[in-house]
Amino acid sequence: MAEAEVGDNVIDVDPTIRALEERVAELLGKPAALWTPSGTMANLIALSVHLRRGDRFLAPRGAHVLTNELGSAAWLAGGMPEPIETDAGPGRPSSTAVRRLTAGASKTPYYALRTTLLCLENTHNAAGGAVTPPDEHAQLVATARDSGLAVHLDGARLWNAAVALDVPPAALTVGTDTVSVCFSKGLGAPVGSAVAGSIAFVEQARRMRQMLGGGVRQGGILAAGCLHALDNLDDLAADHANAERLADGLREFDWDVVQPETNIVLAGVADVPATLAALRDVGVLALPMAGKVRFVTHRDVTAAEIDEVLRRIGEERARRERRHEATTVRA
């Protein structure tokens, strides 16, 4: 990053950002791509280009664009969000569920709500990093096309899905109009995402990024970190293995753990706030999500550290059981 070739990415194009955008477009099978500071901005740009004010857009229940972007899809992009039931599996709507909501969308009368966009998410964050395989993805896209809908894919963790399925990232973007990806999650870059699509889309997206305050000057410093991250995509397999290691260990403590498909472990507990506080007391940090405790493995967490996490949780559990036994004896 310190040695990156840089330029003014607002006045012309920073050469390192240009190299990143060209590489991302190729990886995703799209004509062009645009670097953005964050994935939320990338999604907002895509929705702002796709939607007219008052248009309804569909997304799987619990999707990031519905629950984690502070309503910007409605507030700034002007879209009316509609969740799709995830009846095909965790985080995965079926084509039948999409068809129920899109039937007749291409012939909507002027006095009815227009449905114009389907947003997908792969992997699905709130469903524990759940993966949508290529065949299901293709069916969802085909259903949207039959009703005249555009398709945007929130692929913030698409790299994890590609590694888990052992397919190229472009195999998971087929038929989409636009796709966003992130470099600062499992890949470990300090800053950066991208949104890809047609050349015409990226021209509009560049203007929208500027309107949202996403224009940067010597952004090549940040893009160099993203390029380095892309050089190490295969490292994600170790994160997935560590997530399985953690899940297996938590089950031994009788935690209700969703089997991880990638690098997110969701664990059901009786009292989420109390559990998070107890974990924090022993130096283990996690977050609440979807009514569960959420752990995420990444390149800064080793297998040995997973074992250390399990050791600390085990010791904390033993202390709690001893306190309970002592209280029972006194009673």
Image (cartoon, helix red, strand yellow):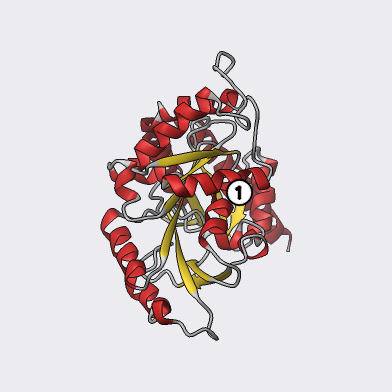
Between residue 9 and residue 326, name the one nearer to us.
9
Q: Is residue 307 left or right of residue 286?
A: left
Residue furthest to the top: 3
Q: Quadrant of residue 170?
A: top left
User: Where residue 283 appears, x then y in whole percent?
Assistant: 65, 37
What residue is drawn where x is 56% and y is 19%? 1
Vertical arrangement, residue 242 with respect to residue 220, above or below: below
Q: Is residue 54 left or right of residue 196?
A: right
- Name the quadrant of the C terminus: bottom right
What residue is drawn where x is 56% and y is 43%? 206
Between residue 151 and residue 204, name the one nearer to us.
204
What residue is drawn where x is 51% and y is 71%? 83
User: Where residue 303 appears, x then y in whole percent?
Assistant: 45, 32
User: Where residue 280 appears, x then y in whole percent?
Assistant: 68, 43
Q: Which residue is mark 1?
A: 208
Check disc 1 and give the amino acid type.
Met
Q: Quadrant of residue 44?
A: bottom right
Between residue 277 and residue 324, name the one nearer to us.
277
User: Where residue 246 appears, x then y in whole percent?
Assistant: 46, 43
